[in-house]
Image (spheres, rainbow, N blue to C red):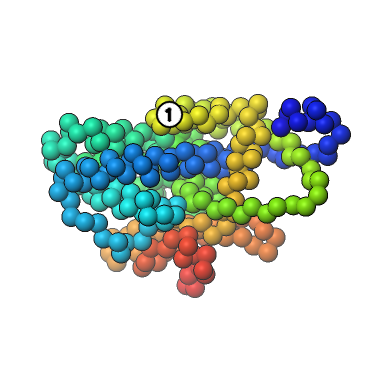
């Protein structure tokens, strides 16, 4: 882009600010684009092999598939297999400890890019990012309380997971979008000579610093090449954020109550002025982005 402008100095430009929200949406887009390739291939094969070695029964196709995993059959299968594997007790470890596919799945699921690895007596860990840890510490789940608690936890820790970075930015819209992480593409071609976007870097120093650790860890884990989060790469992340598409309607299940069983959700809503906000709600059923976009719950 800079080379183009250098050759065409009279071309009209439009300044776009790469702030924390735009940067992290761009980073999330690059992350999802990279990891989905591995989830559809090597990680799916690994999950199949480990499930077979453990003698797990076929996974039910009735359970809702959350996040971007509803995009195709391979991602749906991987989602359901990993959910089943996450329910296996750690006592099964001797049966698969020497299996290379188990070792690879363990390496991925325990990575700090998902938060602090928490095993809880299970074979595979789940990531405890600042939002998850906030939900463990806050008695009454409300949007303001969880946002504040997650921000405090992120600030006082060295967490650099995606949701941790959003918590550090104290942005519940980002926390919802990055936790849900759904691909939505909404490209619209424009006729004529349009303006060339010029991205200005205004990302918080601490967000950029921790994001650098996320990028480094992710690139090493999957042999990818997400660029360093620096001002020199502002246009790279800005363009990725635009590609990320419309995040309105993204809905994610964060937790649940025990008795009666109800599920706690956050969803991204928009008002008449196209401003984002977060809609928190409880439901007796799990809501996905696809369902929420058809119409939010009435009560």
Give left or right: position of 268 versus 231: left
- Residue at screen point 35% across, 47% down: 136
How far across and how far down the image is residue 299, in percent? Answer: 47, 72
In the rendered image, is residue 116 in sight? yes
- Residue at screen point 30% across, 64% down: 62
- Residue at screen point 18% across, 55% down: 57
Give left or right: position of 96 versus 157: left
Most foreground residue, 264 or 186 = 186
Most foreground residue, 290 or 205 = 290
Question: To which quarter of the image does residue 248 belong?
Answer: bottom right
How far across and how far down the image is residue 181, in percent? Answer: 48, 48
How far across and how far down the image is residue 268, in percent? Answer: 54, 57
Vertical arrangement, residue 3 with respect to residue 136, above or below:
above
> Residue beneath label 1, please?
223
How far across and how far down the image is residue 113, in percent? Answer: 42, 35
Question: To which quarter of the image does residue 222 belong?
Answer: top left
Specify few, some or many for label 1: CA neighbours under 10 Å numbering under 14, 14-19, or 20 or more: few
In the rendered image, is residue 118 in sight? no
């Amino acid at each position: 882009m800079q080379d183009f402008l250098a050759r065409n100095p009279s071309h009209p430009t439009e300044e776009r600010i790469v702030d924390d929200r735009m940067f992290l949406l761009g980073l999330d887009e690059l992350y999802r684009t990279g990891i989905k390739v591995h989830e559809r291939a090597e990680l799916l094969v690994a999950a199949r092999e480990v499930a077979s070695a453990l003698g797990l029964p076929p996974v039910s196709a009735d359970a809702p598939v959350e996040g971007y995993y509803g995009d195709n059959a391979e991602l749906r299968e991987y989602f359901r297999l990993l959910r089943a594997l996450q329910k296996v007790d750690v006592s099964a470890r001797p049966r698969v400890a020497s299996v290379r596919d188990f070792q690879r799945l363990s390496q991925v699921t325990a990575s700090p890019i998902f938060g602090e690895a928490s095993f809880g007596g299970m074979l595979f860990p789940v990531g405890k990012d600042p939002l998850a840890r906030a939900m463990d510490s806050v008695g009454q789940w409300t949007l303001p309380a969880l946002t504040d608690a997650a921000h405090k936890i992120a600030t006082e820790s060295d967490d650099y997971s995606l949701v941790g970075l959003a918590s550090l930015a104290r942005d519940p819209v980002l926390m919802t979008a990055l936790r849900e992480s759904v691909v939505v593409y909404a490209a619209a071609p424009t006729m004529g000579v349009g303006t060339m976007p010029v991205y200005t870097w205004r990302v918080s120093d601490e967000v950029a610093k921790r994001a650098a650790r996320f990028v480094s860890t992710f690139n090493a884990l999957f042999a990818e090449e997400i660029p360093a989060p620096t001002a020199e790469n502002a246009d790279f992340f800005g363009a990725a954020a635009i590609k990320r598409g419309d995040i309105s309607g993204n809905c994610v299940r964060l937790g649940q109550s025990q008795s009666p069983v109800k599920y706690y959700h956050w969803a991204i809503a928009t008002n008449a002025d196209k401003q984002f906000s977060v809609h928190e709600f409880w439901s007796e059923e799990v809501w996905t982005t696809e369902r929420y976009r058809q119409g939010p719950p009435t009560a």
